[in-house]
């Protein structure tokens, strides 16, 4: 399969899963202005952790999970928290690449879409960003934490909505997790770790 075929397959599987999920559709319609663009592959250790994770298993979104895995070799893996106080272990194991947006195979003016992966036993510290956000679980499960809300354990097909600058965190236990993550409205600012003592101890 060519790189273009891999990315077209990824776009199709992403669109199918997105459109089949009512919460994602309610958050924002799948963009109608998606355009292909060149992306330079960028590999990180997290890509190897992701590709080798035998615990990932999706029933409802198997096509999407397979397409995300297949694009792992040609994707631009992100290092969003490089240079922050976040641990090297987190940088090595937390996986994310953009599907629609900057440094991604596709672009849209109305939506950003990423894949986010965490292996079992990883903690994603509290963070926030101006964009409103929706997580959709593709496979696995994790504890989702949102400031002002009780913790929730979410699994395949379930979603979590974050309002603008609402701090959130995530923790995997025995299972890994693979999510599709959408942003709307405010794309200008990247995520920042939240420095609030009340959250840091949570
Ligand atoms: Fe977020």
Image: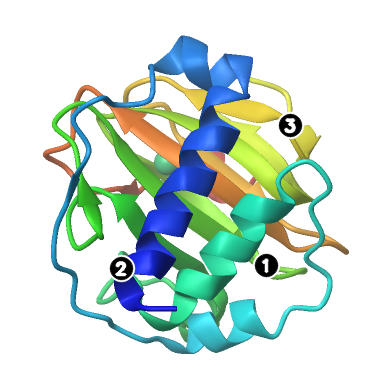
Tell me the residue at 58%/16% (across/down): 23
* Number of numbered discs visible in the structure rendering: 3
* Numbered disc 3: secondary structure: loop
Quarter holding residue 175 = bottom right
- Residue, disc 3: 151
Tell me the residue at 50%/81% (across/down): 47
Q: Is residue 3 above or below residue 141?
A: below
Most distant residue in the right direction? 174
Quarter holding residue 118 = bottom right
Q: Is residue 2 left or right of residue 190?
A: right
Tell me the residue at 61%/77% (across/down): 50
Mark sitting earlier along the chain (1/2):
2
| Quarter of the rendering occupied by the N terminus | bottom left
Mark sitting earlier along the chain (1/3):
1
Q: Which mark is residue 122?
A: 1
Mark sitting earlier along the chain (3/2):
2
Tell me the residue at 29%/75% (across/down): 82
Mark 1 residue crowding within 10 angstroms, few (<14) / some (14–19) / many (20+): many
Mark 2 residue crowding within 10 angstroms, few (<14) / some (14–19) / many (20+): few
| Quarter of the rendering occupied by the C terminus | top right
The Cα atoms of the two marked residues, 1 and 2, are separated by: 33 Å
Do tag 1 and tag 2 residues touch (Cβ < 8 Å)?
no
Q: Given this view, does label 1 or label 2 mark the residue nearer the observer?
A: 2
* Numbered disc 2: secondary structure: helix
On the question of residue 201 being in view, the answer is no
- Residue, disc 2: 4
Q: Given this view, does label 3 or label 2 mark the residue nearer the observer?
A: 2
Q: Which mark is residue 31?
A: none
The Cα atoms of the two marked residues, 3 and 2, are separated by: 40 Å
Mark 3 residue crowding within 10 angstroms, few (<14) / some (14–19) / many (20+): few
């Amino acid at each position: 399969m060519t790189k273009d075929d891999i990315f077209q397959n990824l776009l199709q599987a992403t669109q199918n899963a997105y459109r089949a999920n009512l919460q994602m559709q309610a958050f924002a319609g799948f963009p109608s202005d998606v355009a292909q663009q060149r992306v330079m592959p960028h590999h990180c250790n997290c890509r190897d952790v992701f590709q080798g994770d035998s615990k990932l298993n999706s029933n409802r979104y198997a096509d999407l999970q397979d397409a995300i895995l297949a694009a792992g070799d040609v994707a631009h893996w992100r290092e969003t928290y490089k240079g922050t106080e976040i641990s090297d272990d987190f940088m090595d194991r937390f996986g994310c690449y953009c599907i629609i947006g900057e440094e991604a195979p596709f672009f849209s003016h109305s939506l950003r879409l990423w894949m986010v992966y965490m292996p079992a036993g990883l903690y994603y510290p509290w963070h926030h960003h101006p964009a409103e956000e929706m997580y959709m679980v593709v496979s696995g499960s994790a504890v989702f934490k949102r400031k002002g809300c009780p913790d929730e354990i979410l699994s395949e097909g379930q979603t979590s909505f974050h309002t603008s600058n609402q701090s959130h965190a995530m923790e995997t236990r025995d299972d890994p997790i693979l999510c599709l993550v959408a942003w709307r409205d405010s794309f200008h600012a990247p995520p920042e770790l939240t420095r609030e003592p009340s959250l840091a101890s949570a």
